[in-house]
Amino acid sequence: MINIQKHIIYRRRVYVVILFFLLMFSPLVHAQDIVVREIPSLDKLPVNAIHRIFQDSDGYIWYGTFNGLCRNDGYNIRVFRSDLYHPGLLSDNYITYISEDYEKKIWFGTMKGGYILDKATSQITPMDLQEFSDQNVFTINVTKDGNIWVSMRGVLFRFRADGTLVKRYKTEYNHSPEFVYIVYEDKAGDLLISITRGGMYKLNKETDDFEAYFHNEDYMDIERIIWDETNGYYWLGTWGKGIVRFNPDGKTKEEQYIPQPLPVDITGNPTGAIYHMVQDDIFHYIWVTSWKDLFAFRITEKGMLKQVDTSSFLTPGNKILYEIYKDKEGKLWVSSFDVESFIIDIRDYIVKKYPLPDLRNRLKANPAINSLCKEEEDIFWFSQDRYGLCIYDSQKDKLKHYSECPGTRHLPFGDVYDLVRSHSHNRIWAMPYGSTVFGLSQQNLEMKEELRVDISQITKNPGTNTSLFEDSNDNLWIGTTTGLFVYRIKASTLESIPEVSGHVAGITQTADGRIWAVVKNKGIYQVGQNKHIEHYSFNKDFICVDATSDGNLWIGTAEGEVLMFDHRFKEKLTDYSFNCGMKGDIINNITVDIYNHVWITTNQMIKEFNPRNGAYRSYSTKDKNFLLTRLLSHAVYYDKKGEIYFGGISGIVSISPTQQLESIPEQVKTHITDIKIMGKSIWENKLKQNPITTSVCVSPNDQNLEIEFSSLDFHNLDQIRYAYRMVGVDLDWIYLDDRKNSAFYNRLDKGKYIFQVKATDKNGLWSNEITEVVIHRLPAWYETWWAYLIYVLLCAGFLSYCIYIYLKRMKRKNDEKWADSAELVKMHQYLDTKESLSVPEFAEIDKLLLNRATKAVEEHLGEAEFNVVSLAEAMNMSRSTLSRKIKVITGKTPLDFIKDIKMQHACRMLENKTATIADVITALGYSDYKNFTQSFKEAFGMTPSEYQKQIKEKAEESADSSR
């Protein structure tokens, strides 16, 4: 037992040694050009374990999972499966294979049959698999003639794109039913298949049957076939025998099948079980997934494979992987079971990284680079937060701290605020905290002080260093919290610029030689070559500044603004914050490259912005492959040749300015990925036709409309932006922020609208291709033509009725006016006459006049002031006319008429046993007892008391007689 264990240990050690030498002597993979990236929207899958990956002709990525077929548009996942919302949609949700025919329908297999998905309508129909409809679909392949080949155990089906079954072929080996691994068309147009345990077969076009093709009993389980266009031969991925180079023109089996070294895993053990295999388009490596891990092989000059080291981008360790799939962009998608599926991104253009391992080892923590510059010979100068000034050889990965150099160990370089490279060879300017600037040089990483500029020598209030700039005339400009100073390097003289005061945030120079300084909350100062100073006042919290070759200044502020100052318009700052997609984060640095692109740095983002066409690219610290997790304010250096260097938490990165933002825009097509009405996708409604090519109907009760879209660029999601508009609703294009891909509308009016959307390409350039979809908001019943017809008829009827009433009323008024005219003549005659007339009409008027006069008096019985004038006003008559008519009719004066009415009321009131004479006097508006008694006696011949007594006696007599 002990000997067996020793043998096993010995064998493992041998494999480890073999792996070590294999990796040591094989060329290293281009680590800087290969990164592992996350698959977008992976967290939205119903299960993280992906079994199959496929990209269709439109660009959508499809996943086969253990719980449904999934479509990825880069932002969202759409799932097709049987569940509580879609009962009975599929017989089984385990997706085994995915393919697409030439009519853009998706064919996919499950553990219990196969299905065809119409992408335009989302309708799913089962394949006609006859008695095999409840069995596992192993593979689905589409050939150039449009036929679809579906493999199941013991049978290979051949379908047309319309789902019609053409033929079924038996797939047996040694009378045992087997699966077809793959249906492959070779470069000559011949159709090859490989059968489990049975090797390769070729279709005889004359007999329409498969015949054995270069059988070799050692290589019978052939999983994959690749034609290597570069080298001119086939690579076969086998189960158990690894990768084999295949040459059908070989004369012997040994010349036809040439075995390659087996992949060796992290433990040193070889593995020959190949699942999937692809060849990349850049390095032409052969990439394979096995039952242990992902492996890469380069092809030697002799046509043999050499395993390469992938540990620089791929975490070492055994993994349960399935498929490796190459998309249209040449990126490799790897599906996994026990870890998250991922993308192998092979690029020609990429961010270079400097993780500074030597510094990391010293600190036992992440580097935090807060200022930096670089010499030509790959020598970096940088300041590490809380550690101080360092010099670093990136080629040799050697680092030296300022305290290790005799020439700088006593200098205050524990915190260097800014570093600027001098135009003089082998010199840099270091600006530590305080009011002194140091000129340093190095040789073999030995730092040395060359000169010192102390601002306190010429002013009592030097302030603290804030900014540093060396111009093209060998002048060093120093900004502090109190003002601006210039050191003439050749003359070794230091001067103050007294016209500039305040906190100098940034200094730059334009092509005409003028110096510009931005001062916090004061504005912009221009220093001409004749020392003439001009001041442009702006109350802005400026942070940084740089200039383009046309003389425009680009300025960043603490409020996150990106501003442009054109000296031709001295009173104006043009805000470009929205144009370059800023979100209000403080602008730490602005750098202009040789293409006049403006590089804007915040704590979490770098943006390359082209002011001429509005295009921009973004680099985010949220990207795990970016290295930096935070960018620091002064850690930016541009060598004016090829690279811009950015420092921050975790090290340094460099990006090469290019003319990509100047190129012609790619004609990117934007796809409508989903349309939701009241939160529900229209594709859930069992559509019969493609709504994108017809129109989307919205009912009047459906108030909310959401449209989602994508350019299906899975590898540049941070660079892609969208703009949309609803013609007839939106006055102009609405531009979305990064990662936003939907439009929302509420309460559209009835009618037809055209929704338009466009996108940028990966370089931030707007595509001219506009995608349109017609939106038809259906009218409610009260908005239909027949409803409007009813409204018109009702309005017409109502208007006719109103006209009829109006005409009738006018006729009546005219008649009344005629009658009134006649009556008016009679009334004048009546009022003017001084004697009573026997005309019946006048007698009636006399009666009306007396009744109205009586009523007027009765309404004012209690008012002592009510007299003849008051009665005339109440009657709307003159006093004379009233007096004349009362006299004619009653023979009394108006005063007697009033008194007579009051006395009659006095009699009725005195008949009430409970009423007193005082009550009657008050009720009738008399001022004293004497006047009332006299009036009453004149009217009735007795006093009020005598009248009451008389009434009482009559009452007693009446009572006695009743007894």
Image (spheres, rainbow, N blue to C red):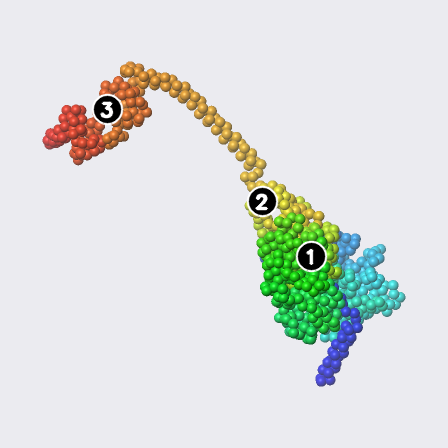
Mark 3 or mark 2: name the one nearer the start of the chain: 2
Mark 1 or mark 2: name the one nearer the start of the chain: 1
Q: Position of residue 858 (x, y in %)?
A: 26, 29
- Which part of the image, by quadrant, shows the N terminus? bottom right
Does the residue at mark 3 contact the one at mark 1 (Cβ under 8 Å)?
no
Q: Which residue is mark 2?
A: 748
Query: Closer to us: mark 1 or mark 2?
Result: 1
> Which is nearer the eye, 99 or 403?
403
Residue that protrudes farthest toward the right in the picture: 251
Q: Position of residue 957 (x, y in %)?
A: 11, 29
- Name the residue rendered at 61%, 45% in the picture: 730
Q: Which residue is mark 3?
A: 895
SS for dot 2: loop
> Which is nearer the eye, 422 or 154?
422
- Name the residue rendered at 22%, 31% in the picture: 925
CA–CA distance in space, label 3 to label 2: 79 Å
Q: Position of residue 443 (x, y in %)?
A: 74, 71
Is residue 775 visible in this depiction of the protein?
no
Locate residue 44: give its quadrant. bottom right
Determine whether 291 is above or below 535 in the image. below
The amino acid at mark 2 is Leu
The amino acid at mark 3 is Leu
- Name the residue rendered at 60%, 44% in the picture: 729
Does the residue at mark 3 contact the one at mark 2 (Cβ under 8 Å)?
no
Query: Closer to us: mark 3 or mark 2?
Result: 3
SS for dot 3: helix
Q: Position of residue 289 (x, y in %)?
A: 73, 66
CA–CA distance in space, label 3 to label 1: 110 Å
- Count of marks overlaid on the render: 3
> Which is nearer the eye, 24 or 136?
24
Q: Which residue is mark 1?
A: 509
Within-10-Å neighbours for mark 2: few <14, some 14–19, many 20+: some
